[in-house]
């Protein structure tokens, strides 16, 4: 909570000057959204445990921060130490130059958290090579999305007037993550159709990077962008106090990579075999949900929205291309599922202009 209060104080110092710099090219009001989860709980599961559950995790309790805003507020993320150009990704570049090519009704969302803790391996270990049964780990979970308002509400059941309060949107994004990961090994006397499990191994840092397409709705953001003027009753503004919900579906494609540690361990446990390749084509199927209570206040030209709720996020990461084709190959399957969740606090602020 202390960190969230620091964020709110920083917003109070930064936002006034930034809001007045709204670009005339954008039809959205200048806005900023901040979400903070002080204690994010993680779970990671291998999708294939037919050959044993040998890797155990004890995750630290870390926080997660998320910032979003349109082109008028580009500098805010940088002031909080978050940059869209992590790992030189295309989404960050598109946002960097978007203001010059007149991208309307787009905004950027940056989300970052640390994933750390201790893992313990209870399976077989090679006799030599410096492999270990337990170790601390720490890595970043990072997402950046370029998002656009959607007119999907016009085609949804219930009518355009009612569904407009949902704030439907679509976008493209980039996600980077890394975890210690147990993976199954695959061997064959010849041909993929005869594959069977070898001795499983683990990687100290399996990494995956994806480009994705996303869509969903966000009632909080929509309230911020409309200044609370649209409520569930046609022709009436939203009630100052109420419940909210936001959700997102995402599908992504990219590459997963097993480090040299994992390759060496797998080959040591399965002598006479050669690891097929450390990189593989990987897909991401992702879902997130946030529900809770919110309160808004029109403070002259500034719209303020506060919310507290619970956030849930889960994804399946499935790898392809690690098959064993002959009796010298050592294939692998590194597919896994993760889930994280925690209490969240959110702040939205927008410049609605002076009333005439």
Image: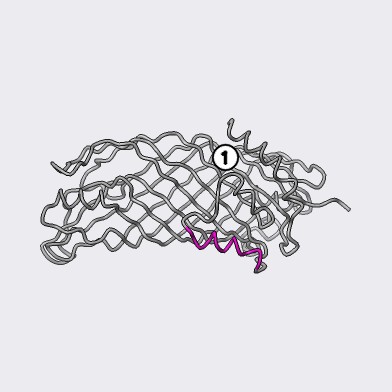
* Left or right placement of residue 121 versus residue 174 in this view: left
- The front one of 139 and 301 is 139
Q: Which residue is pictured at 64% across the width and 51% down the height?
A: 75
* Left or right placement of residue 18 versus residue 341 in this view: right
Q: Quadrant of residue 216?
A: bottom right
- The front one of 202 and 153 is 202
Question: Residue 145 location, x and y as percent?
Answer: 54, 56
Main SS category, magenta section = helix
In the depicted structure, whether residue 279 falls above or below residue 111: below
Question: Residue 101 location, x and y as percent?
Answer: 65, 69
The kind of secondary structure element at disc 1 is strand
**Do we see residue 346 in this rendering?**
yes
In the depicted structure, whether residue 44 falls above or below residue 107: above
Circle 1 residue: 36
Q: Which residue is pictured at 50% across the width and 52% down the height?
A: 143
* Left or right placement of residue 106 versus residue 195 in this view: right
Q: Which quadrant of the figure contains the N terminus?
A: top right
Point out the stretch of residues depicted in magenta. Answer: 88-100
Label 1 crowd (10 A; few <14 / some 14-19 / many >=20): many
């Amino acid at each position: 909570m202390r960190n969230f209060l620091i964020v709110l104080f920083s917003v109070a110092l930064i936002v006034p000057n930034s809001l007045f710099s709204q670009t005339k090219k954008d039809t959205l009001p200048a806005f900023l959204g901040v979400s903070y989860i002080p204690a994010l709980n993680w779970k990671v599961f291998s999708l294939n445990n037919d050959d044993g559950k040998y890797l155990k995790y004890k995750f630290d309790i870390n926080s997660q921060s998320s910032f979003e805003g349109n082109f008028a507020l580009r500098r805010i993320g940088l002031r909080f130490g978050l940059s869209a150009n992590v790992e030189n990704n295309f989404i960050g570049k598109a946002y960097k130059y978007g203001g010059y090519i007149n991208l309307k009704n787009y905004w950027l969302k940056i989300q970052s958290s640390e994933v750390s803790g201790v893992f313990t391996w209870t399976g077989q270990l090679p006799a030599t090579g410096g492999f270990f049964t337990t170790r601390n780990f720490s890595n970043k979970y990072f997402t950046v999305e370029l998002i656009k308002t959607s007119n999907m509400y016009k085609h949804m059941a219930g009518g355009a007037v009612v569904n407009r309060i949902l704030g439907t949107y679509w976008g493209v994004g980039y996600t980077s993550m890394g975890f210690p990961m147990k993976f199954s090994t695959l061997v064959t006397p010849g041909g993929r159709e005869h594959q069977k499990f070898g001795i499983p191994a683990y990687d100290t840092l399996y990494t995956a990077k994806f480009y994705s397409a996303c869509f969903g709705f966000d009632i909080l953001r929509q309230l911020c962008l409309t200044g609370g003027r649209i409520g569930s009753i046609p022709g009436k503004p939203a009630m100052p106090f109420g419940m909210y919900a936001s959700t997102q579906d995402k599908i992504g494609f990219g590459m997963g990579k097993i480090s040299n540690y994992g390759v060496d361990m797998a080959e040591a446990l399965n002598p006479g075999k050669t690891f097929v390749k450390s990189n593989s084509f990987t897909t991401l199927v992702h879902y997130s949900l946030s529900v809770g209570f919110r309160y808004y206040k029109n403070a002259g030209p500034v719209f303020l929205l506060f919310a507290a709720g619970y956030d849930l996020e889960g994804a399946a990461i499935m790898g392809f291309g690690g098959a064993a084709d002959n009796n010298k190959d050592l294939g692998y399957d590194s597919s896994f599922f993760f889930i994280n969740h925690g209490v969240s606090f959110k702040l939205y602020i927008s410049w609605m202009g002076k009333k005439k």
